[in-house]
Image (cartoon, coloured by chain):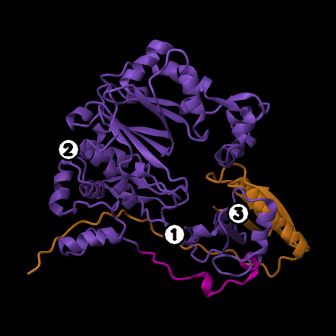
Chain colours: A purple, B orange
Amino acid sequence: MTIEARYGVPTVAVHTDKFDRVVRAVAAQNGMPGLRQAFVPQPVMGKTAAELRAYVDGSDPVTKRPVMQEVVEGLTRPLDDADDPAIEFDRSTPRLVAPDTEERLHRLFLDNDWTDKLPIVLPTEERVAAMLARTTRKPDETVGRMRPTHFREAWEYTVEKVAVNAVMAGAEPAYFPVILALASTGVSARGSSSSSLATMAVVNGPVCHEIGMNVGTGALGPHNHANATIGRAYGLLSQNLQGGSTPGITYMGSMGNNYAYNSVTFGENEERSPWEPFHVQHGCRPGDSAVSVFTGCRSTAFTLGLREKHWRDHVRNMLRGLDPHTPPTLLLDPITARQFVERGGFLRKDALIDWLHENGTMRADEYWDYQLVQNYIYPRATFGEEPWASKLRAAPDELIPMFRREDIHVVVVGGETNGYWRIMGCAYQKTLSVDAWR
Amino acid sequence: MTNTLSVLNPVGFAPRITRKALAPRLDTLDGKTVYLVDCRFDDSDVFLKQMQAWLAQHMPAVRTVFKPISSVYLNDDPATWEEIRARGHAAIVGVGH
């Protein structure tokens, strides 16, 4: 679209057929509904040159016409009315839904993809007003902008819109400043990546106790109202405030992700942690309340405790089990956190992170052959971006770090019923104040 | 009489759409330079080289340039777009996904 619109060069974009509806929607939202596109079968990834030549020689699975006819005509067929179809320029959102019965409104919300397919609380004026009463911010104040992927348009939302979604999730009004803080990150909990990513949200500071969040036994499970509904609200507000999360149009996760039901939302167990809290590592004071968000949650590795003799090997094995494109965040029960102190001598989280960086290694040739490394890291390395450019100079059999040190994180959570711990593959995004939204 | 409820709409505010014009099309590709722009995603390079081979075989009067973008597809690449405008007549971009 950029080459066509900004540089005036006739262009045809080639996509796989699974993305037919989404690419047409994106073109229309960018003001180019007639953008010329051609389609080939999915997947391209992993196919041989001969198989891909057959795609080129074959038919466009969307139009049923030869692929190359679509491409050549896309560049040469004169523009006409078909290239300028009508599109809706006014997409203003009414404040209220047309009044109806409770049953029919539930059906409407479900049919419009405004829910996570679980029952919701209908956002009446009264309920939304109760939510708004728990912040000093004005209802019409803009909180942020959000979008499902990098290339899509960003939608805007106000304090009231966030409150509507918080009500739908079943959240108590007391939770609202935390939900507003999550909304203010602008990080979507309904990312549309075909990798089926989910987010993780960690809450720190006094607000955890004030609203009764669970940081101990069962903190990551469906056992606490605040954890459950704050996380659910984060998902609902993401899908509704970014313009949707509908499979095939605004959501392309191939398998989907159960973590998305409540965005892995919990508080850090600061009192039982041997280290400084996560939000303090990221610029807050201990008395501040804050939310930290991570994206790309897909993979999890786990084990029990740290064995005296081979714990280093066990941790290395866990790191090697992750895709090297997605860095590790350790979620440690306090029992295991103390074992890292006692067995590894890691008096500070930083020391543990150093060790993880130095020991999470892989042969260079294996590393560069990962598909996601090829897609997202190799192009940056070839154009000199560090530290990947240096990694690219490594001999094929040289062990290189799988992850950048700054991408490795540690959070303490759990109730010490045992020393189970896990590694969540995910990318830390930002830490923002809850207090600013009180 | 059936009781009705009034509830708020949960959807955010979409930005206004600004219509953008498509570039004028070419009369023919013969004698023209077509850039095959590789998004560097999921083996798109292998695919576009097959398309380049097809053009060489079936439309030999078309000059093609295989051009990988300068970084990942998430980043804008004005240097590459400028090169295409300066030296090319048309572009085929792939594979979007």
Q: Is residue A213 left or right of residue B87?
A: left
Highlighted range, magenta: A69-90
The image quadrant of residue A140 is: bottom left
| Residue at the image position 71 percent from the left and 70 percent from the top | A11
A29 and A172: which is toward the camera: A172
Label 3: state its secondary structure. Answer: strand
Measure how far apart labels 3 and 1 are at the Cα level: 20 Å
**In the rendered view, would you say B68 is above or below A396?**
below
| Mark 1 element type | helix
- Camera-nearest label, 3 or 1: 3
Q: Write down the residue under mark 1.
A: A29
Q: Is residue B59 visible?
A: no
Q: Is there one chain holding both mark 2 and mark 1?
A: yes
Which disc is residue A226 wearing? none
Q: Position of residue A332 (x, y in %)?
A: 41, 28
Q: Chain of mark 2?
A: A
Is A307 left, or right, of A264 in this rendering?
right
Q: Quick one: A338 or A92, which is closer to the camera?
A: A338
The amino acid type, in three-letter code, at marker 1 is: Gln
Say whether mark 1 and mark 3 are on the same chain. no
Residue A311 image offset from top left, x and y in percent: 53, 20
**Type of the residue with mark 3:** Gly
Q: Is residue A322 above or below residue A199?
A: above
How crowded is the residue under tag 1: few (<14 C-alpha within 10 Å), some, or many (20+)? Answer: many
- Report the residue marked by disc 3: B94
Q: Quadrant of the N terminus of chain A?
A: bottom right
Q: CA distance from mark 2 to mark 1?
A: 37 Å
